[in-house]
Image (spheres, rainbow, N blue to C red):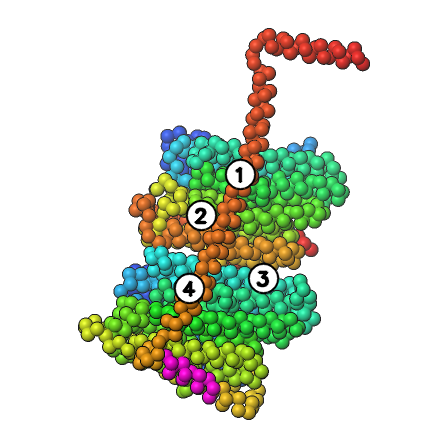
Amino acid sequence: MDSLPLLSLILLCPVVGVVTLFAVPDHKATVVKWVSFTVAAIAMLLSLIMFIGYDRGNAGFQFVEQYAWLPGLNSTYHVGVDGTGAVLVLLNAIVMLTGVITSFSVQFRVKEYFILFLVLVTGVFGSFICLDFLLFFIFFEIAVLPMYLLIGIWGSTNREYAALKLTLMLLAGSGLVFAGLIMTYFNSAVRSFDFFALKEHAALSPDMQNIIYPLMFLGFGTLAAVFPLHNWSPDGHVAAPTAVSMLHAGVLMKLGAYGVLRYGIEMYPIGAETWRTVAAVMAAGGVVYGALVAAQQTDLKYMIGYSSVSHMGLVMFGLAAGTSYAVSGAVFQMFSHGIMTALFFSAVGFFYEQSHTRDISAYGGLARKAPWVSICFILAGLAGIGLPGLAGFPAEFMIFVGAYEKFPILTLIAVPSLVFGAFYMLRVLQRVFFGPEAGHTPEIRDLSFFGGTARVGLAALIVLFGIMPRLLSDVIAPYAEALFK
Amino acid sequence: MSELLQIKLTLTTVLAPIVSFVLIFLFFLRQHAIARWVSLLGITTSAACSTMLLWSVDSPAHHETVSLPWLLPGDINFSIGLLLDPLSLVMLWIVALIGTLVQMYSFSYMEDDANQAKFFAFISLFCFAMMGFTIAPNLFQSYVFWELVGLGSYLLIGFWNHLPSAATAARKAFIVTRLGDLGFFAAILVAFAGLGSVDYAGMAAGKNSLWTASLGGLDVATWTSIGLFLAVAGKSAQFPLYGWLPDAMEGPTPVSALIHAATMVAAGVYLLARNSFLLTVGSESCVIAWEGIAAIAMLTALMSGAVAIVQNDIKRVFAYSTISQLGYMVVGIGTGAVVAGMMHLFTHAFFKALLFLSAGAFIHAAHSNSIQDIARAGGSRLKVPMYSLLAGSFALAGLFPFAGFYSKDAILEHLLVEHHYIFLAAALVGVLVTSYYTFRVIFVMISEKGDGHDHHLHTGAWMVPPLVLLMIGALFSGNIWNFAVKHWFSIKHVEHGNAALITALVSSGVALIGIYYSWRVFYKKSSADPMEKMKGLANVLREKWYLDWSYDKLVHAIYLPFTWLLNRIELRFVKGALDGIGTACMNVARGFSRLQSGEVQQYFGLMLAATAVVILLITRL
């Protein structure tokens, strides 16, 4: 087991998928889909093996591999996962598999779609496991760029605009990160891109850290949709095809938060300390703002988009507070929110394919027409408003408890988002799933078995991690505690 | 009984209903007959086990805690476990018992419903949540199950969710109580930050200096108390958050019985009782806060009692009476009479469940909620429901020898002994109002002999046993408490001279006056309805003190416009700024692109100009 290069194998799955797909003829759509499914399933299995095999008593990096890559720059292929990485790799595998299943309904330019999809996933896997700043940055770009094509070609509502805005904003963010990367490289005592080397021996002056940390926070924060740099995200969600929304909200935004944690807070602790309050105010602002703006949305995807702004705000708030509870909660929330939004978008896509509308008022009484998919959506919704017993609660609770220590007033400002969330979410649940039936509902059929596995599976995970949060927190907590020793 | 056996029994009690829920949900959603039996079996198991547990309580000091870290590894602060002491065991027993009777009753009440399997699944979930809340050894677990109780009520109140009114009532219940839950959450944050523990035992034993540490002008204990009371005001329907409870009538009647007797609303009072140690650990400001809590509760009791007078829906009369009785409980606990408050919770559970279930029997038979309609349909000919309505009403009015007499007097006696004379006077006014509106229902009912048509009124077969058992409860639960339960709570019995006798006589006298007046107005019709004379007051009461109106304004005139404004800002400025940057870039680019005209003359001209500039610069230097 130990000899198996598990992380590289996981990373290789989508790569093999991409290469294989190039060999498949364009018109064999079914083959394309099943090839993608197979690599996603293998990646899922390997990630599960990795997650189960992860030593919970050990806070350090595990499954580490290191090979020479660019010796001239002191950059190596160095991979490994710790508490955050392990959780996020698992999340990415889950969203990838369910995303592929959801994408079986894609009809147009199927091969190109799945190739781009798998390229995107490769980038995300790579970013989560890389321990080399330069390599990380490359994977990070690989994860971001396919979004432009995926939204621009397969998207819906206002797709060119959304794709352009998303790409430009994320590239602007990358620019800031790249500037920070270069500054770190040339100002550090070690001239290396290796994460450990930089973290231990970079010896950056406090002034330098104070300059670089904001670059990292804003750069990665853009991808995490931190308020007020969030505006690309709801538009992007709405325009993107279903599975791309799932990936986008499910894992890409987490990549931003992960960047802030690993290449921000861990690398520049002094800078993070200096900018703590500013970061917390932005994050808490997003929590409340997102929940309030969501109440005005009439499009289901916009509603979810703004709720994501609120939930990602919570992640950033936890990170900004920087206590072991808060960071554990933030990482937990990355996972919970990933599963939750993947399910949201998957369910909305399912409705949209059948009725071609996402207008909330066009629906009604869906729970009676299509009970299974409705239950899935409702569970995600209840998890979103922090109901205990579902995966959102442990995360929110830890974040608030941890953050109160550092920012009591801000925390008490952010906590009412629990009510604001309930307000818009229950309103939508009532309109869409309960009440009398509206014009569009008669056409909606319930989930098929195959499509059902994805949605019901995600819903089951929401319940599982809600009832047994220790499944995750056992992995996360040692890491978070070690971080603030 | 060994500790291990006790723990096993508790776990069985609590988990049996959730097992029923899972079984029904996974396998029996379409098999109604099996589903209802699975559900009843689960809750009966709970009732049996909790009875055995109650039996095993042998000393007042009995106290048992088991906790396992749930949220984080090795972190005992946020754990799930169980706390067994007289308070939790008595509460557990009430929940299981009332739950069993209500489910049995639902066999008849829900017999024609197409979704009854789901109904039984939800009601099992609801009971599970309440029991998990009851045995919580720390604030954290209390919060977890408190929220689940909220979920249960949401699902059950909105059970007939194809009716917009039911769906709206469910949403209102959830959101209004959640508003209170913010207080709960804040209390956890404050207590944990201040004490480093949210465990009840740990909190009660917490250093006095930690509790009285100054925090934003007040102290930790005070803020915790205020936060918790907000939560209690939500769930236990106190001013200003009680507006959801009367609307919760949209749920099936057995649900109302459960919510009003043993689960939802009882949770708040129980939480307050559980945290009553705060009264002793805090400073002066904390004591004042608890006085304030009692005052708000007293106000609630009077306000809602008055509203009950003008209600014509039989369930709404009882709903407002619940709010009023909850007020009494909170007054008791708020002024330090925890045992008396819990006693009233105990007896109230029986007689209020009885009242709702008998109301349900009338509604089920007459197909109307209106007292007048039921009366016209000949409701008074329904034997068993009529007797149970009478028994429940005597208990509610607090007349000897019914249970309400003992428990209400326990609170009144405490108010007298502790010199809370203002509260005492207000409470007596409440007694008058209570007996007046309670017997209004009965007198209206029996003043009509029915319209002579044969309505085929009948009482469902499964309705009778619960009604009979609850009638016994309405009669004897006060005595049961006094003889069997009271001594577990280590209270030193102090003789207060004639205080008990005085309050008993005075309050009974006041209640009889209320009944007499009610009889004159509604049966003999020799006095005019006072509400006819006081039109202004009657209108205010019919508008429920404009509380719903205020909620409505809060949402539609403040909250929604504010979100609208934010949404405009989002579109106009946040999105607008980005679009603006985009447009600006485009314009600049367009400007420069003019230079790329493709005309040789223009390029040549530019070249000459540039050369001239360069030459000029060089020669100048």
Residue tagged 3? B186
Q: Main secondary structure of the magenta part?
A: helix
Q: Residue at x 65, y 33 (%)?
A: A70
Within 10 Å of disc 1 (Cα), the crowding (few <14, some 14-19, many 20+) is few
Of callouts 4 and 3, which one flags the residue occurring earlier in the amino acid sequence? Answer: 3
The foreground one among B215 and B113 is B215
Q: Quadrant of residue B402?
A: bottom left
Question: Residue B334: horizontal and vertical position, in percent?
Answer: 55, 75
Residue tagged 2? A344
Front disc: 4 or 2 = 4
The answer to whether marks 1 and 3 sit on the same chain is yes
Q: Residue at x 68, y 46 (%)?
A: A275
What are the residue bounds of the magenta stretch? B505-518
Question: Residue A19: horizontal and vertical position, in percent?
Answer: 48, 33
The foreground one among A240 and B523 is B523
Front disc: 4 or 3 = 4
Q: Amino acid at mark 2?
A: Phe
Q: CA distance from mark 4 to mark 3?
A: 32 Å
Chain bearing mark 3: B
Q: CA distance from mark 1 to mark 2?
A: 27 Å
Chain bearing mark 1: B
* Numbered disc 1: secondary structure: helix
The answer to whether marks 2 and 3 sit on the same chain is no
Question: Residue B288: horizontal and vertical position, in percent?
Answer: 62, 72
* Numbered disc 3: secondary structure: helix
Of callouts 1 and 3, which one flags the residue occurring earlier in the amino acid sequence? Answer: 3
Residue tagged 4? B543
